Image: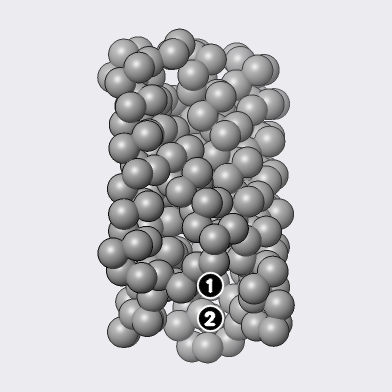
Amino acid sequence: MPPLCIILAVLTVVFAVGCISFRRKGRAFEGMMCKFMASFGFISVAVVGYCLNPADTYYFCLVCFALMFGFFGDVLLGIKEVAPTFRGKLVPLGTLYFLIGHVFYLCAFITRSGFNLGALIFGLCGGIFALAVIKLLKMKVDNKLWIIMSVYYFALTYKAASAAVLAFGSGQAAYIIAFIGAVLFVISDTCLAFLYFTPVKRKNIWVTVELSTYYPAQILLAMSVALMK
């Protein structure tokens, strides 16, 4: 791993910790700014990693696009924290940006592992599971967001399953950490769904778990570029 990538990853972690700390204290604006800087850090790790180790341009481009859409999603969801009046518009739009990011990650994994029917079935089960949970828990989502969330969870779980196929099939460190990142993303977004659409108690705990899994997920996915062979 190039030392510069490690330094950038550490700086990203510092901003991530700042975001979690500010959010727990109810300081939305400072938390939002730290979140933006951490999101920029993800992209920096991937770009520097590729510049120092240009092993796979196509994989890098797909991951970089995924990180950029995640950055824009973070911007939209971060603005929601300081401008809750626009929450109804920002949450679906931010979710859509992250969905596109997951599709880019998915493409990065599939182009390396090939199509796998088991991974697709796992993704479909994930989408159906999301549908059932939304209905059973009576989550506060309208029809449009209900569809987006179902497709989102399909892409999210399909991505994780495809990363697993790639990691266990190749044994490469790059794909193993990408798989860990994909799994952490599933945990993070599951917590986020409960935070946004159910009346959870002890909100700070959910926020901490969501953010403390989201940041490592994006850092690991970005660092997979630097470990490519």
The amino acid type, in three-letter code, at marker 1 is: Gly
Which residue in the protein does label 2 denote?
22
Q: Residue at x 37, y 52 (%)?
A: 131
Question: Is residue 4 placed above or below 51 in the rendered structure?
Answer: below
Q: CA distance from mark 1 to mark 2?
A: 6 Å
Question: Is residue 107 placed above or below 81 in the rendered structure?
Answer: above
Instruction: Name the residue nearer the viewer: 108 or 198.
Output: 198
Question: Is residue 122 placed above or below 184 in the rendered structure?
Answer: above
Instruction: Name the residue nearer the viewer: 48 or 224.
Output: 224
Query: Which mark is drawn over residue 18?
Result: 1
Pointer 1: residues within 10 angstroms few (<14), some, or many (20+)?
some
Q: Residue at x 48, y 88 (%)?
A: 25
Q: Secondary structure at mark 2?
A: helix
In this figure, which colouring scheme has been used for the structure? one colour
Q: Residue at x 55, y 51 (%)?
A: 148
The amino acid type, in three-letter code, at marker 2 is: Phe
